[in-house]
Image: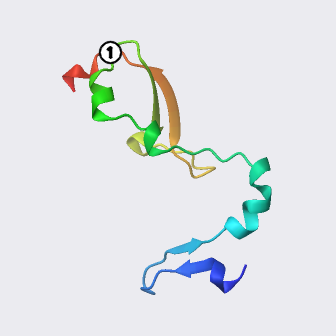
Amino acid sequence: MSKQSVILHPDETIDLAAILLAPYISPYLKSLYIPYITKDDIATDIYMKNINILHDIIMIGYPDGIMDAVNNMPVFRKGITATSSHRL
């Protein structure tokens, strides 16, 4: 990996870097499965106000600090609402 592929934080006391992987993985992108979400996948306030009981939901995050420690990923959970969100 070349030095141009690694971008270090300008403050040397901060341990943070970005690694530009596109040049290395772009030939393989069609064969890789890379899950992602976009802003369009996130519920808006208007959508949330219209959710009623027995509605399918997906939760992505770190509830109570729980995570997939093996893959360093958030937890994905699917469920059904039990109460109306109008009370939220």
The number of numbered discs placed on residues in the rendered structure image is 1
Q: Is residue 33 left or right of residue 43?
A: right
User: Where does the image place residue 72, in percent across and percent down from the top left?
Assistant: 57, 52
Q: Is residue 75 left or right of residue 35?
A: left
Residue type, label 1: Asn
How packed is label 1: few (under 14 Cα within 10 Å), some, or many (20 or more)? some
Locate the N terminus by quadrant.
bottom right
Residue depicted at x 41% and y 40% = 63
Residue depicted at x 42% and y 85% = 11
User: Where does the image place residue 77, in percent across and percent down from the top left?
Assistant: 50, 31
Residue 3 visible (yes or no): yes
**Figure colour scheme:** rainbow
User: Where does the image place residue 22, in percent across and percent down from the top left?
Assistant: 68, 66
Residue depicted at x 28% and y 33% = 45
Locate the C terminus by quadrant.
top left
Residue 61 visible (yes or no): no
- Residue 85's image quarter? top left
As drawn, 22 above or below 82: below
Pick the front one: 68 or 20:
20
Q: Disc 1 marks which residue?
A: 52
Q: Is residue 63 left or right of residue 36?
A: left
Q: Is residue 20 left or right of residue 41?
A: right
